Image (cartoon, grey):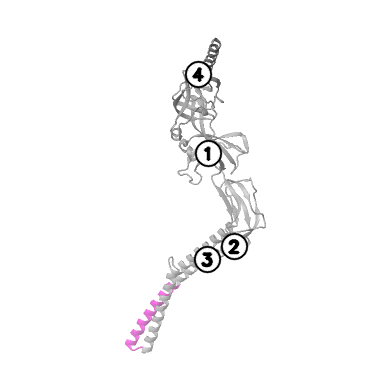
Amino acid sequence: MRRRWLLWVVALAVLVAGALFVFGAGREADIVVVRRAPIVQSVVATGRVATPARIEVSSQLAARIERISVREGDAVKAGAVLVQLRSDEAEAALVAARAALREAEGRQAQLVRVQRPVSEQQLAQAQANLRLADQELARARDLVARGFVAQARVDDAVRGEATARAALAAAQAQAQGNREGGAESELARVRIEQARANVASATARLDLLTLRAPVDATVLTRTAEPGDTAQTGRAILTLAQNGETRVIATVDEKNLRYLRAGQRASALADAFPAQPFEAELFYVAPSVDAQRGTVEVRLRVPQPPAFLKPEMTVSVEMVVGRRDSALVLPADAVRDADAAAAASGKAAVLAVRDGRAERVPVSVGLRGVGTVEVLEGLAEGDAVILPSSSARPGDRVRQRAVRALANPQAVPMMTR
């Protein structure tokens, strides 16, 4: 009997020890402490280097290429000759047009210096002849009336007067046509205008055979060689206009709320990952690409490095939020209650309160690389249980380890 009693005592002692171990010591849990640290949130996007404009140099006429003065990578100034096409026929046409202009101008000079004065003199002579014919007719009529001459004398005088009057009319018409504003004068003016238009047309056609740089630029591509035939509208050279260097990138539309013009950014060219350069966001597209779910952004590069080239792939990190001193936790310590709560900044953590796990609602702010800012719900020094532990709300817990922040300086978040 006594032996059975001792067995019961030993069993009870074992049960009590197990209960004390399980319920007294509590569950082991990985714990992290809320602390103050700087945090930066940023949005990262991939894009390409863009120039203010890409210009394709092509011919408006089909002609043989005689000379190309530049190659890929060359810098050119506005007005510099890039391509020379065969121009023999156009030059001959221009010579002929200039000769025709000189002829038209010579005819006008002849009209002014010779024909106009001569016609005026002829008009004066016709007027004098008419006066003489009128006097002769009057004299003949007087002599006939007095019976000194026959009627035939009057008939001759009438014919003379009519001839003089017709000659006067012809001289007047000739003089009027040669005067300023007259028919001959206008015809000479029109001939000169036509000749000048022909010269301008021939000059323009000749100019089309010399292809020049429209702006200061850099040659990107060259697709022809001397001896080739330039085809209408087919690019011979492609230029990148000099000016402000830009980066055009696309950002996931979920990050649209973070973007503002004027935000600073750090950029890296994939070909030179160790040489970052500064950029500034200046444009956010007013619409979203519905197929990709992205929005286009543009950044200017105030001081582009020498290695930066058009169409180069670039990653840009736009800083959208910064705190020099914030309450921070590892991002995996925060348990989002649901999608709506996460979107609104409301979430929860399992905090250690009086040795037990307690679900505490928190409001989160900026999100950095592996870290998150706690705005409400926790204080500096509070212990938070990581999700890797099996503890549940209400469990008694004991600390297994205190994990420090991976990066107390809060490297900016890389989110796409």
- Mark 3 / mark 4, whichever is N-terminal: 4
Q: Position of residue 231 (x, y in %)?
A: 61, 59
- The label on residue 300 is 1
Quadrant including the N terminus: top right
Separation of disc 2 and disc 3 at Cα?
14 Å
Judging by the rendered image, the residue that carries numbered circle 4 is 23
Dot 2, crowdedness within 10 Å: few (<14), some or many (≥20)? some
Q: CA distance from mark 1 to mark 4?
A: 62 Å
Amino acid marked by disc 4: Phe
Total tally of numbered discs in the picture: 4
In front: label 1 or label 3: 1
Out of 413 and 357, give the one closest to the viewer.
Answer: 357
Going by the image, does 69 lie left or right of 341?
right
Instruction: Identify the amino acid type marked 1.
Output: Arg
Give the mark, 4 or 2, whose residue is nearer the N terminus.
4
Mark 1 or mark 4: name the one nearer the start of the chain. 4
Disc 2: which residue: 95
What percent of the width, then of the height, locates residue 349? 47, 26
Cα distance in 3D space between marks 1 and 3: 57 Å
Q: What's drawn in magenta, residue-wise?
A: 122-148
Measured Cα–Cα span from mark 2 to mark 1: 50 Å
**Residue that label 3 marks:** 104
Category of crowding for the residue at label 4, using alpha-carbon neighbours closer than 10 angstroms: few (below 14), some (14–19), many (at least 20): few
Q: Residue at x 52, y 39 (%)?
A: 299
Contact, mark 1 vs mark 4 (Cβ under 8 Å): no
**Depth-wise, is mark 2 or mark 1 nearer the camera?**
1
Q: Tell me where residue 210 appears, x and y as whole percent.
A: 60, 55
